[in-house]
Amino acid sequence: MKLTLAYSKEEDLVPVLPIIEKKVNRGIELETEKVKEDELKFKLSNFDLIYAPLPVFFHLGKATILSNGAIVVNSLGISNTNIEKICVSGSNSTEFYLVRALLNPKAIPVTTSSQDCSKVTTESYEIPLSNVWKSKCNDLPIVLKVILLGTVPEDVIPKVKAIIRESASIQENLHLVSPGSKELGLKGRKAIECFFKISKENLSTPEVTYRIM
């Protein structure tokens, strides 16, 4: 069975690369298509699976998240001291919302290559964003992207979960992803809750409705 997967950045695919490269073969293949991050919110009915940043949820009535294959980090920071303009892949990026919610609500997203904006990165940063996150969300990891269920048939979901978990486990053993990518677990679920909580408190974002499978 072939399933379609939308993504916006190459690094999104790291947890599922063994499936794409057919190193994990359980009767499911992934056909990937690159989509601009700000267009993902319009594509839920066009793909079986979608790698999406958490702020996309603010544009959806409801959504279903796969508990496997998420992009999860423990460390995050801003490349320099400029928190006015932030380099982003899209205005709905989780990183951009974190900067706004935790440091500067008036930060401006810059989606074009520019030396005037700061990057949000997991290494070599000057402002440790994860420290501010921990002051609000304790020792929870930071979930940057999750796999949303689009048009994938309901009866196929258990098989999809199993194969993505196996794929992410391979990548975890290679130290390419964190344990939360294999399975969100309680901490990953609470991290998503905390993101929406601080977004609502500091940015007045709308309530979101989702379930995790």
Image (cartoon, grey):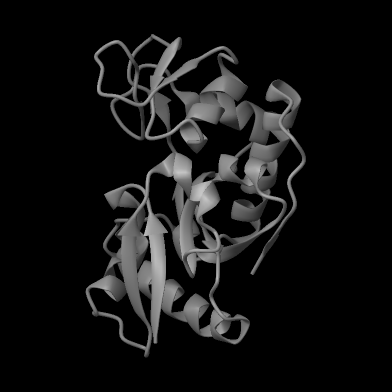
Q: What is the x, y in percent for residue 52?
A: 49, 50
Front residue of 178/64: it is: 64
In the rendered view, would you say 58 is above or below 136?
below
Residue occupying image coordinates x 35% and y 18%: 118
Residue at 24 percent across and 79 percent down: it is: 23
Tell me where residue 144 appears, x and y as whole percent.
49, 44
Position of the C terminus, as image quadrant, is bottom right
Relative to 52, residue 21 above or below: below
Q: At which x and y percent is residue 31?
A: 32, 71
Identify which residue, 61 or 107, lies in the foreground.
61
For image coordinates 64% across by 43% down, the residue present is: 59
In the image: residue 193, left or right of residue 94: right
Answer above or below: position of 5 versus 86. below
Using residue 120 as the reference point, say whether residue 105 is left or right of it: right
Spot occupied by residue 58 in the image (x, y as percentages of width and height)? 66, 41
Q: Quadrant of residue 157?
A: bottom right
77 horizontally vs 99: left or right: left
Tell me what residue is drawn at x 45 percent, y 12 percent. 83
